[in-house]
Amino acid sequence: MNFFLETLKVTGLFFYYLLESLVFLIVPRRKKDVSGEIVLVTGAGSGIGRLLSLKFASLGSTVVLWDINEEGLKETGKLATKNGAARVHTYVCDCSKRQDIYRVADQVKKEVGDVTILINNAGIVTGKTFMDSPDSLVEKTMEVNIMAHFWTYKAFLPAMIASNHGHLVSIASAAGLVGVNRLSDYCASKYGAVGFAESIALEMRDMGKNGVKTTVVCPFVINTGMFDGCEAKWQTLLPILEPEYVAEKIMTAIRQDQEILALPRSVYFLIALKHMLPVKAAVIFAEYFGVMSLMNAFKGQGKRD
């Protein structure tokens, strides 16, 4: 009897959530108010990190900006102040070093307060074949792109759990959903970022902390300089994304408590194909869409934001 009732419950919820998602494709979800929130953005000195910082500033949030680039950090701070941030706090932080993250996190908690929206955005890319990637760069990629997420969560998640209020945002990558030629360390770090964020989301659900939201962002190549030279074969399906467009989509996803955001929408289709098709058939499509040759002309800057 219990099996029957549980099966009935699961079936009912399945169709309810399916219908809900279809409705939200037509009727946009209500956007939450982020004024007064304390928003920490790593890699805030440029690119997507800067754009997100300015957008939160314009909505009346207190913005806490982290970057290893002091000049870029100062510029973002000035712009955030002009954009109407409630308060602006800048901190030079090397996200590849656990102790530096913990040290600066303690400063933030003492000088600003408990972070309520954490955006792990800082990232780097090597862009070499696996055998040509120096050990030091592989380690640095893992330290910045995924290990930093562990340490920032350790630092700021306890307060969110205690108050049952907060939002964890991981700027991952479409390369965290599918392997890409000449991006072995980057893909590994981004797969890790996606899996880690999803696992924490399930932990929050299991703990009954439904006030702590999570969003994982998986964009294709963004025109920030990080992936200069990269170009997919069919631009209509996999266009190089403009930073302003991506930042606006991320803001909407955060304010609507969207769990996962892939950009462009064709990424959802390609990932579904990957999991449905035989491996050899999926590789043919990867070659057709230009994924295999994406990094052939790579000359990026190596750092994201």
Image (cartoon, rainbow, N blue to C red):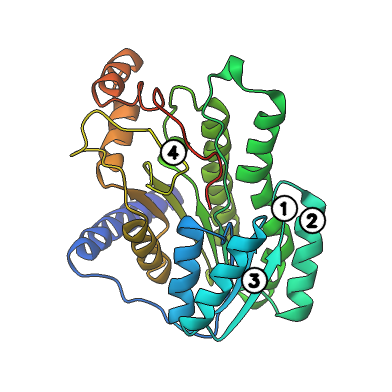
Check if mark 3's residue and mark 2's residue have beta carbons within 8 Å: no
Dot 3 or dot 4: first in sequence order is: 3
Please give left or right for residue 172 compared with residue 276 in the image: right
| N-terminal label among 4 and 1 | 1
Q: Quadrant of residue 104?
A: bottom right
- How far apart marks 1 and 2 lie (CA) works out to 6 Å
User: Identity of the amino acid at label 1?
Assistant: Asp
Which residue matches tag 2?
Answer: 100
Quickly name the residue at label 1.
94
Residue under label 3:
160
Q: Is residue 270 left or right of residue 71?
A: left
Look at the numbered discs 1 and 2 and tell me whether their residues touch, using CB distance below 8 Å: yes
Residue identifier under label 4 = 227
Q: Amino acid at mark 2?
A: Asp
* Number of the front mark, 3 or 2: 2
Q: Kindly identify the residue that appears in the image at 39 percent across and 61 percent down.
A: 247
Nearest the viewer among 258 and 99 is: 99
Left or right of 196 on screen, residue 284: left
Q: Is residue 193 above or below residue 104?
A: above
Task: Look at discs 1 and 3 and give the one toward the viewer.
Answer: 1
Q: Where does residue 11 sit, x and y in percent of width and height?
A: 31, 52
For the residues labelled 3 and 4, the Cα–Cα distance comes to 34 Å
User: Dot 2, how many residues are within 10 Å of its Cα: few (below 14), some (14-19), or many (20+)?
Assistant: some
Label 2 residue SS = helix
Q: Nearer the viewer, mark 3 or mark 4?
A: 4
